[in-house]
Image: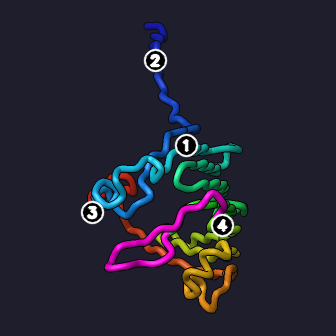
Amino acid sequence: AGPTSVDVDVVMKERWYVLTYPVFDLADRNINEWWYDRGRSFRRVIYGGRLDYRNVSGNNDRLVGVAEFGFLNRFLIAYQRPYIDRAQRTGLRFDVSYQTNKEIAYRSRFDKLVFLRSEELLRKRVFVGASLTRRNGFYQFQSLGLRYVHNQIADTVARINPTYYGDGRTRQQYLQLSYGYRFDRRDNVAYPLR
């Protein structure tokens, strides 16, 4: 008896690494506030797009970009690389965001937000951040982050509400230090059975 040959067909399905999807959101706290209190105004809608690009360089890294317009203008770019060392325990993340508003809530009256609208920019927010991640064991994840935040409001806002940033100031800037610890023993992260 001679050797027999077997044909095997393997069909592979590659996951999509680049995803883009639209953003449509309301600026108000919920749909009832937008519908009844704000008159269903489309000036209070946030629209735009989001890009999520995974495995950018083949190292399971991720690039996220956000562009939003309408009630606010916001641009965000974030890059995350899960491992930067040979032991595959240490990772990095960088992000930067820029946001402007021509309409903001500057105070509340009878438990309702009071908004001010102008053709000039009323608020500008910028942050730049970096974080270091560490996986010490199979179930343990830690992160240490540092972020610089700079917020600025127009003189008009500080004049009509001097307590917005306190003492009539128009600028707020600070460093934010954060630490996170996660212990995750799920048997399957996407669909845990226990």
* CB atoms of marks 2 and 3 within 8 Å: no
Q: Residue beneath label 3, please?
A: 194
Residues at marks 4 and 3, CA–CA distance in whole angstroms: 45 Å
Q: Quadrant of residue 17?
A: top right
Q: Kindly report the distance in space between the C-alpha atoms of the residues bearing marks 2 and 4.
A: 60 Å
Name which of mark 3 and mark 1 comes first in the sequence: 1
- Where disc 4 sits, the SS reads strand
Q: Which one is earlier in the sequence, the residue at label 2 or at label 4?
A: 2
Q: Quadrant of the C terminus?
A: bottom left
Badge 3 marks a residue whose secondary structure is loop
In this picture, which residue range is highlighted in magenta? 105-121
Measured Cα–Cα span from mark 3 to mark 1 = 36 Å
| Residue underneath mark 1 | 49
Quadrant including the N terminus: top left
Q: Main secondary structure of the magenta part?
A: strand
User: What residue did someone put label 2 on?
Assistant: 8
Q: Residues within 10 Å of mark 2 (few under 14, many from 20)?
A: few
Q: Nearer the viewer, mark 3 or mark 1?
A: 1
Q: Using residue 43 as the reference point, say whether residue 166 is left or right of it.
A: right
Q: Nearer the viewer, mark 2 or mark 1?
A: 1
Q: Earlier in the sequence, mark 2 or mark 3?
A: 2
* Residue plotted at (45% across, 10% down): 4
Tell me which residue sits at (66%, 72%) in the image. Answer: 154
The kind of residue on which mark 2 rests is Val
Q: Position of residue 34 (x, y in %)?
A: 34, 56
